[in-house]
Image (spheres, helix red, strand yellow):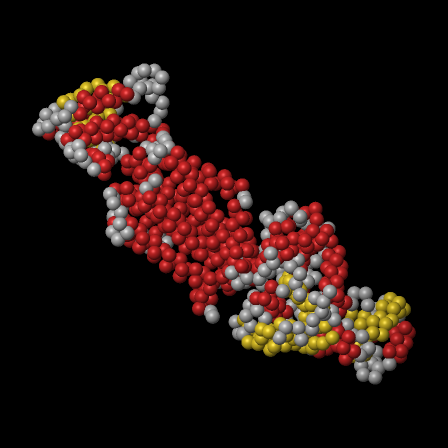
Amino acid sequence: MAKFWVIFKREYTQVVKKKSFLVGIFLTPALMAAFILLPGLLATTEQSEPERVAIVDRSGMQLGERFAEEVKRYTITEDEIEAYRIVEIFELRTTEGERYTELIDSLSQVIQDKGVKYVLAFRPNPQLSDTNLTLITNSDDFRAINRFERTLTDIVSSIRLQESDVNLPVDSVLTLTNRIDLQIRDTKGESIPFEVKYFSALAFVMLIYAMIVSYGSILMRSVIEEKSSRIMEVLLSSVTPFELMLGKVLGLGAAALTTVVVWVVLGGLIMVGTGGTVVAISDSISRVVFNPVIVTFFVLFLVSGYLLYSTIFALIGSILNSEKESQNYIFPIVIFLMLPVIVGIGVVRDPYVIWAQVMSYIPLFSPTMMIMRIMFIAPTETSYSLFSGIVFEGTVSFLLVVAATLLMTWISGRIFRIGILMYGKRPTLPELMRWVRHK
Amino acid sequence: MYLVLDSVRKEFDNKVAVNDLSLEVPRGVIYGIIGPNGAGKTTTIRMIMNIIAPDSGRIIFENQEADRNFTDRVGYLPEERGLYKKMTVKDVMTYMAELKGKRFAEIEDRIDPWLERMDLLDYKERKVEDLSKGMAQKLQFLTTILHDPDVVILDELFSGLDPINIELIKDILLELKRSGKTILFSTHVMEQAEKLCDHICMISSGKKVLDGKMAEVKARFGKGTIQIEIDGDGSFVRTIDGVASVTEFPNYLELRLGKGANPSAILKQIVDKVAVTRFQLSEPSLYDIFIDTAKVSREQLMGEGEEAHHG
């Protein structure tokens, strides 16, 4: 066991000591953040004049008036100019459903003609369901959406509080002041957070992919280096092949994990430092990035996925002779991790689609496919249970990955111990099978 | 006996690499395993080092089955040598010693004196890739002995070593022997073995041909060899009565004498034909002994020696 730690320590320090490791720790989240936020940030150019808003109010409780009043608090920096100009409030009776639809249609046209940027549409009983509050826009300016949601939250919360029993328990009061989740759609009727979900899921999946592939290929290259430089024989005169493989896999895994821990701690500090509201990040994104279910499964799938794939990388490294050869082998492995990303659009549309469900239980796909589904499904679930819903699905899929990892470790160990001493011709598949069975 | 191989056997794909080989290595000697490449030397050493398991037979060290405790007490330098290019000289030395179960504190004080002796002290914090080939060879040898092993095993020690390093390493091996360490090495270069070994074991095609103390082995073959240096064509010496065989070296001839041959009479016949610049009656060389006993031709022995080694 002592020998295992010697190997572990070297593999770990060899990676962590490098400058590129430190750069990666800080650069990767920056790139990720850019990847998630860029579409939104590009839209949020510095505002120079008021943005025009029209309101269709069928709520029957002067919601439009109150909104117009409240939203005045937002001004364009320094100039005391209002940030949003309410050009028109169409106040309808709660029963005028047909007129409401007509108005929305014609106002959608106005949006397309750039007459207004936002149309807020309020149906009756907004205090009962968020679905009665809609924002129509072709912009995905997170700041504006955020401000509208905050403003409406204030108004609707006070309506709810007025309507309810004053002697409510604290829990219920918190429910009453729940933040409004505006139903946002563009003039074609599609909901905007699609992009938010897609890009943040993509960023997380790419992160898992990048960690597995980069540390996996470090591992493979290091096995090949020891083989081609013939250090292997000296190593094997001191340690068993299995100790060597395990020391390398876990040592490099620890380096990868160090990175993730730094990120989680940094993320946590940002959370605490900003009092829960994350600066400059839209609410819908922070709900994804800081969702405990998503974060937990992200770490679980990253770790188990790394272990599963790294044993495969170790196996391949052990049967190759030169780094040049290895290039041909990275791609077929990578394709398993990439496929879920390639078909990702379909998963965003419907994370329960049958092929996505099946794929998320195949261990080689799970680390990327399951986490993608979790990211789309988890924010929509109101409560979590280990025995139902997405947490259950994720747990089963994770356990399958663990089982596959154990099996693969055993197989790789058997091939590794023979492969690392074989030079020259690459073994054929039947030969590999024989190595696995060899006593 | 210190280290014993008891009928050790290894087959690869139905080809016998080591055929029931038995060896007895006493403590505190330099022991040479000699034979052409492909004879099974590397396989034998790999089995001693527990890198591959024998199909049958036992390896016994200090009267116990050799295990990890044994391999930790061995310094092993394989024929094909390499080091981590990106590690510093000091880190490589430390790592290799730690793999042998030493803590850094135990070897820390040994690093500088050895580097000094090898003229590598200035490179202590440099990366291995900055070293010249000769320096890397010295470092490889250092990593083999830094953890103060009781047994040093060197496979084809001299292959690829430059001449200065050969002398340096020979000196150190003799010192190690004097301090009670046991040195086991393999080579196909018989002259090297002849100069260095106390004990030898000759193997051919996986089988032991003969073994024993160097002096005894030679005595067994008697002083039946003449080495001569001549000016001119020496091809006629084969036809002289009493000459059993002739081996031509670039600068001299080696004649094996038949039973009862008279060296003086043979010298006389040679002097009649060509000028002789040196004449020496001596023990046979290991080459001759090997050729005589293993029944292989000198060409075979030399030829195989030049080929790439596949262990």
Q: Name above or below for residue B50 compared with residue B219.
A: above
Closer to us: A226 or B30: B30
User: Which residue is rendered at x = 28% and y = 27% of the image?
Assistant: A147
Residue A146: horizontal and vertical position, in percent? 29, 29
Among the 4 quarters of the image, the one containing residue A65 = top left
Residue B167: horizontal and vertical position, in percent? 76, 59
Closer to us: B62 or A234: B62
Q: Is residue B219 left or right of residue A387?
A: right
- Judged from this view, the residue extending furthest toward the top is A80
Q: Is residue B169 visible?
A: yes
Residue B136: horizontal and vertical position, in percent? 67, 53
Q: Name above or below for residue A342 compared with residue B147.
A: above
Among the 4 quarters of the image, the one containing residue B107 = bottom right
- Judged from this view, the residue extending furthest toward the left is A95
Residue A289: horizontal and vertical position, in percent? 34, 40
Q: Is residue B291 visible?
A: no
Among the 4 quarters of the image, the one containing residue B247 = bottom right
User: Which residue is rendered at x = 49% and y = 51% of the image?
Assistant: A252
Closer to us: B277 or B109: B109
